[in-house]
Amino acid sequence: MTVDEQAWGRVLVLHARVEQELAKALQRRHGLGLSEYRALGKLVAGPRGGLRMQELADAIGLNQSSVSRMCARLEDAGLTIRDLCEDDRRGVYSVITDAGRKRYAETEPTYNAVLRTALDKAASDPELADAVSAVRGA
């Protein structure tokens, strides 16, 4: 195995561990999936609180079909609404609601605390310490 393969393997292990901790905490404490949290974050930061479905898919690393299903769940929960693009009636936007903004604001401190704790824990593992340093920009 090359040095690059070994380094990439450590990054993948780090990613999997951190994602698992984040997903578990967000679901348990806030009833929100990790992709849903990330989608709300992108919508909060988006122009006028919304993004085209394809833009949202690209921003969170999911395919359009998965984003459509996720957005349906967010709509059912009252966290987003769908809106048609004024310029192109075929284009569909996902737009965050006030309830979605509130849920994101309530969830963000948990996300940041769990992320910090997961990275700190991984940094104490000699196999992952360099990967954590790279992620943190050290």
Image (tube, grey):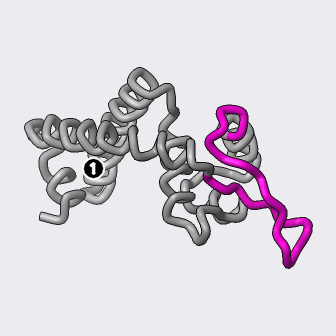
Residue type of the residue flagged with mark 1? Gln
Residue 129 lies left or right of residue 22; in this view the side is left
Residue tagged 1: 6
Instruction: Label 1: state its secondary structure.
Output: helix
Closer to the camera, 67 or 89?
A: 89
Identify the magenta region: 75-96
Q: Position of residue 13 (x, y in %)?
A: 32, 39
Pick out the residue farthest to the front. 98
User: Which quadrant of the view contains residue 47?
Assistant: bottom right
Q: Position of residue 25 (x, y in %)?
A: 36, 27
Residue at 26% from the left image edge and 36% from the top image edge? 114
Residue at 24% from the left image edge and 57% from the top image edge? 135
Closer to the camera, 130 or 138?
A: 138
Closer to the camera, 30 or 123?
A: 30
Q: Position of residue 65 (x, y in %)?
A: 76, 46
User: Which quadrant of the view contains residue 10?
Assistant: top left
Dot 1: few (<14), some (14–19), or many (≥20) neighbours within 10 Å?
few
User: Vertical placement of 46 versus 17: above or below?
Assistant: below
